Structure formats: structure tokens, C-alpha cells
Image (spheres, rainbow, N blue to C red):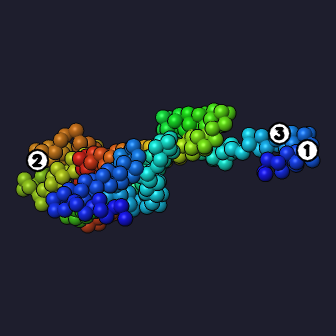
Amino acid sequence: MNILPFLKPVSGVKTSAVVLLSSLLLTACAMSPTSPEGSENVRTKLTQLQQDPDMTNYARVELRDAEAAVELAEQPVDNDEAALAAHRVYMADRMVEIARAKGETRLLEAERELLAEQRDAARLAARTREADRAHAEAESARSSQAQSAALSAREAEELQRQIDTLEAEATERGLVLTLGDVLFATGSANIQGGTNRNLEKLVDFLNQYPDRQVLIEGHTDNVGSAAFNETLSRQRAESVRQFLINRGVASRRLTVSGYGFERPIASNDTATGRQQNRRVEVVIENRE
Amino acid sequence: MKTDTIRCAFSRIGLSTTLIFAVLTLMACASAPLPPTQSLNDARDAIASAEQAEARQYAGAELEEANRHLAAAVKAVEAERMAEADRLARQASVAAELAVARTEAAKAAAINREMGRGAEALGEEMQRQGDQQ
């Protein structure tokens, strides 16, 4: 009953002024108890974490607990409960920090899986590279081996071809090339006609295999004295040696001997046999 | 009227009985604020866990803070300020938990750094091998 007569005279501008004033007073009253000192800072920190997708992902439970603690810290308290307010703010702050630390730990652990994957990938790449290189090396070794094998096979083939061309006979002593007496006139040590197809092939062969030693042995039939035949056989062998030297074969490779009629290869009773016995044998020693 | 009744009772029960009653009441009053045993035990456990987790090495400040709060809580118990003791004990617990959490984060970061270095070294090794080729 007392209030109404008091309000009645207030009208127009005055009414609105009073409403404004009272609302301001109300706001001031509402504000002061809702924010204990320090709670705003904690709320700010928590909001930051809540806006971080990694944190909301990895520290969901801790953030919820921190949220509850912060809400409690924001509760208004009586003026004589400042210690309680400070305690709540402290608790909220530490819980926010715990949420942050746990979120960071789990994020690091998640990253670790990624790191391990990267490391495994790098390791795998290194191994693959290593294996590839080893494979390539083995391959090239194999091919070079094959090459050298092919080369030596070709060489052997070539030698055989040369030997075949030479019409030489492979014996224990080496390749034996028999030059018939058609080279020489009877009783003469000079090579007829200056050149001879067999001798040319011998020169080619010796030039191609320069590390082989050569024995040149002269032989005769049993016509005439032993001394004559020995001299003649030596001279014929010497003629062949000279021929080879003239064609560029090193003289130190060439050894000469005359055996006369000591080593017949056929009977001296027939003309054919005697012809076979009159010969120069060129022994190309086997490579040691 | 009431005072008359009490006086009547006093006279009836006797002075000795009244004295015993008074002493009992005082004792009850003295033991009413119980020490926050649960909070204190929790705090001690939390600090022990933190020490177990090598918090001294990785989060020494936080562990120190927890110990400080616990000591203050014990003092508050002695001074029979039990509400304060409870709060301090809870603060000690949460500080010790933070020490553990930060220790674990620091350890995780160290492991990741180590792994990163390992991967880097491997990468460099590969690079070198690549250069040699």
C-alpha cells in the first residue's frame, strides 16, 4: 500500500531513469559474486584447449573433468569464503593443466606410430635399395663371368681352328706340325720356292700365341752316313728357324735340333716310308 | 517456569552427574572436526606415484608443490583447521597428478625426439648410399 503512492508521482523520463538505474545495480550485484578471482584465467585456458581438436580428441575425459572443476570455481561464494574460492580455482587450474599434459602425451604417442611407420618405410626403402644393388652387382658379376667364359670358349675355339688349319697333331709334348720333305730339294737345306703355305700358317699361329716355345727338329731317312744325315737334319731345321725369324718370330722362342735318321716314323725300306721319314717337326709346346 | 524445572532436575540427579555430562559434551565438541584422513592418504599415494614415475627428474617443480601442500595440510591438522587441511591435501593430490602427467608428456616427447633422430640418421645414411651409387 505504501509503495504505490511512492511510484505514482514518478512518470515519463523519470520512470525510465529509475528502471535503468535499478537494472544497472542488479547487473553489478550479479557480476561481483559470479567470478571469484582467477577463475576467468582458468576459463580462458580451458577454452583454448577445448578449441584444439587434438586436445578434444586425445583428452576428452580430462577436459570434461576440468570443465566441471572450472564451473565449480566460477560459483559465487560468500565474502568470508575467499579461501574456498582460491582452492577451487587452484584445483580447476591444475586439472586444466593435467588435461593439457595428458592430451599432449597421447598426441605424441599417436605421432610415434606415424614416426615408426615412417622409419619402417625408410628402413624398407633402404633394404630394397640394398637388395637391388646386390642383385645388380650379382647380375653384372654373372654377366662378366659369362662374358669371360664366352671369351675363353671363343679363344679355345679359335685355337682349335688355328690348330686345324695348321694340320698339327696334339701330343703330350705339344702341337706337332710335320713339314714334309717337299720343302727341300734332295740333299739341300734350303727351303724351296721361298714360301710355303704350311709355314705361313705356322707364322700366323706363332704370332697369335707369342708365349709359346717352339722346338724345331730335323729328321732324315737312312740314305747316307749318320753324320751327314745329322748335319743335314740340323741344317734343315735351322732353315725353318731362319725362315720363322725372318717372318718376325722371336729367336729366343725357337730351339733347333737335328736327329738324322735316329727317329724314323715309317720304314726306310720303301720309298714312301723314306719320304715320310724326311721331315721337319715343329713342336709348339703347351702353355704351362 | 523452566528454570524452576531445571533446578528441580539438578537437585534430583545431583551435581556429580551434571559434571560428567558436561565433560562428555566438551570431549564431543573437541573431536567433532575429524582430520581429513582420506584426503591426506590420497595425497600421500599420489605423491608416491609421482616419485615412482621419476617426476623428480621430469616435473620437479610440480612434485615440490605437492609436497609443500601436503606439509601445509599436516600442519593444518595439527592446528585443528580441518577444512583447510582437507583442501590442502586435495591440492597436494592434484599437484602430484599434474607432476605425473607432465612427466609422462616429457618422456613421450623425449622418445619421439629420439625416434625422429633415428629416422633422420637413417635418411642420411640412405642419402649417402644413394650418393655412392
Q: Are marks 3 and 1 on the same chain?
A: yes
Query: Circle 3 sits on which residue?
Result: B23
Q: Chain of mark 1?
A: B
Instruction: Residue B20: give x, y in percent of width and height.
Output: 87, 41
Instruction: Residue A146: give x, y in percent of width and height.
Output: 29, 62
For image coordinates 25% across by 53% down, the residue present is A21
Query: Circle 2 sits on which residue?
Result: A247
The answer to which image quadrant residue A135 occupies is bottom left
Query: Circle 1 sits on which residue?
Result: B11
Instruction: Residue B133: give x, y in percent of width and height.
Output: 24, 50
SS category of the residue bearing label 2: loop
Q: What's the residue type where badge 3 is placed?
A: Val
Q: Residue furthest left?
A: A193
Using the rendered image of the protein, determine whether residue B30 is visible from the camera's viewpoint: yes
| Relative horizontal placement of residue A20, taking residue B111 as reference (left or right) | left
CB under 8 Å between callouts 1 and 2? no
Dot in front, 3 or 2: 3
Q: Chain of mark 3?
A: B
Instruction: Residue A30: give x, y in percent of width and height.
Output: 36, 54
Q: What's the residue type where badge 1 is placed?
A: Ser
Q: Are marks 3 and 2 on the same chain?
A: no
Q: What's the residue type where badge 2 is placed?
A: Arg
| Relative horizontal placement of residue A272, taking residue A197 as reference (left or right) | right
